[in-house]
Image (tube, rainbow, N blue to C red):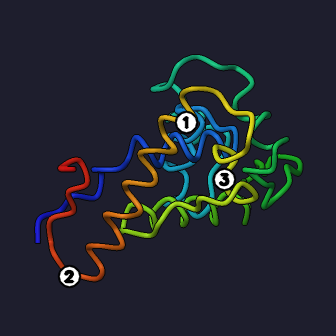
């Protein structure tokens, strides 16, 4: 079986943006921090230097509940942070979808399926429908080649 994890990455990334409101840089940061059990602001800043400049990224991610304080700053001891349960669940969900879990198509679980959405949401909805069908067909046929564009 060939490794084809990223085939649907763009669709999954758009879903993450629609559901959680994360832009690409914030998602990249959270994906980087996911493997770090604990981190300091210095660790955060080191990877943040690779992303587009946003001086408020750390505080925004903390305020929005993606990052939480693990150990508070005390005298000379620096503060230590970790990803919140909300962040780890979201990232696990991304990995599950990359490994073949379907993207939800109900409006209560996926804002792209709500009534009054824009054109891009509708285009991605169509792709999600095809992607989910390909995943179901793959599971039924146990076929190694997920090909949904050959209609």
Q: Select label 1 or label 2 by which is in front.
A: 1
The quadrant where residue 63 appears: top right
Report which residue position mark 1 lands on: 122
The local secondary structure at tag 3 comes to: loop
The local secondary structure at tag 1 comes to: helix
* Sequence-first disc among 1 and 3: 3
**Residue 79: image location, x then y, percent:** 78, 50
Q: Are marks 2 and 3 in contact (CB under 8 Å)?
A: no
Residue displayed at 67% across by 60% down = 106
Residue displayed at 64% across by 43% down = 112
Report which residue position mark 2 lands on: 142
Label 1 neighbour load within 10 Å: few <14, some 14-19, many 20+:
some
Residue displayed at 49% across by 60% down = 35
The quadrant where residue 131 appears: bottom left
Asked if 93 appears above or below 42 in the picture, the reply is: below
- Specify the label residue 149 is tagged with: none
The quadrant where residue 18 appears: top right
Quarter of the image with the N terminus is bottom left
Label 2 neighbour load within 10 Å: few <14, some 14-19, many 20+:
few
Alpha carbon separation for disc pair 1 and 2: 29 Å
* Sequence-first disc among 1 and 2: 1
Q: Is residue 78 left or right of residue 3?
A: right
Report which residue position mark 3 lands on: 110
Q: Select label 1 or label 3 by which is in front.
A: 1
* Sequence-first disc among 2 and 3: 3
* Closer to the camera in the image, 67 or 147: 147
């Amino acid at each position: 079986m060939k490794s084809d994890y990223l085939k649907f990455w763009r669709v999954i990334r758009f879903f993450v943006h629609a559901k959680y409101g994360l832009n690409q840089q914030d998602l990249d940061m959270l994906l980087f921090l996911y493997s770090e059990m604990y981190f300091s602001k210095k660790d955060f800043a080191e990877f943040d230097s690779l992303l587009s400049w946003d001086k408020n990224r750390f505080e925004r991610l903390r305020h929005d509940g993606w990052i939480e304080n693990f150990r508070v700053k005390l005298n000379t001891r620096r503060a230590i942070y970790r990803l919140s349960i909300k962040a780890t669940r979201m990232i696990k969900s991304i990995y599950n979808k990359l490994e073949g879990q379907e993207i939800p198509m109900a409006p209560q679980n996926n804002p792209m399926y709500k009534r009054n959405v824009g054109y891009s949401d509708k285009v991605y909805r169509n792709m999600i429908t095809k992607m989910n069908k390909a995943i179901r067909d793959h599971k039924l046929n146990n076929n190694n080649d997920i090909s949904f564009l050959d209609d």
